[in-house]
Amino acid sequence: MLLVVGRIGRAHGVLGEATIEIRTDLPDDRFIVGSQLVTDPAERGPLTIESLRYHNGILLLKFREAHDRTSIEKLRDTLLVADIDMANEAQFEDEFHVQQLIGLSVINETGELIGELSDVLNLPGQDLLAVKTPTGEILIPFVAEFVPEVDIESGRIIVSPPPGLLHLTESADE
């Protein structure tokens, strides 16, 4: 599966290094000298990592295809995409990529369909599941107490939300 792992920022210095906004939990596995990354938009790549280093906590990459500051500036805001084998990704049983979850059916513990997962919101306190329902969107805290099971194989997420949470959108419409 193709996943965005970074975004090219501004040029750093005159030798063709770019600042990188890291969008992965595993930058050491995604950014390796010699590896080639797909780009979005596609016509700006693919890009091959020629060198990498950290400067004041910021990842700097140099690409074979961009030799100076001007060529890096033309790549600014380009997304860097890597082909990830999802089967080998999870280090722990309860780790998932958002792309694996989007579109899964969300059901309650009795098997009643609540809706479809449309997004996972990464907030400072906790992640929230954004569930599209017939009456609107509801947000469910993505914690074991309210989300006891995620079954990617069967395409479902079982939730046990606190009383009243599922009916918030209905009472707001009344």
Image (cartoon, rainbow, N blue to C red):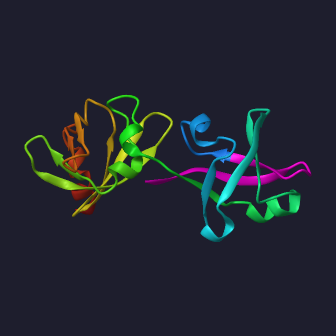
Q: Is residue 166 left or right of residue 129?
A: left
Image quadrant in which the N terminus is located? bottom left
Where is residue 59 shown, x and y percent of the image? 72, 40
Q: Residue at x 39, y 44 (%)?
A: 86
List x then y, in percent, for residue 56: 79, 32
Residue at the far bottom in the pictured view: 43
Residue 86 vs residue 6, the one in the foreground: 86
Residue projecting furthest to the right: 14
Give the left or right position of residue 77, taking residue 157 as reference: right
Residue closest to the far front = 34
Q: Main secondary structure of the magenta part?
A: strand
The magenta stretch spans which residues? 1-20
Residue drawn where x is 54% and y is 37% of the image: 25
Asked whether 53 or 50 is in front, the reply is 50
Query: In the image, is residue 137 above or below residue 60?
Result: below
* Residue 106 placement (x, y as % from top left): 22, 50
- Is 6 positioned to the left or the right of 134 in the image? right
Residue found at x 19% / y 38%: 160
Q: Position of residue 53 (x, y in %)?
A: 77, 36
Position above or below: 31 against 125: below
Left or right: residue 33 compared with residue 131: right
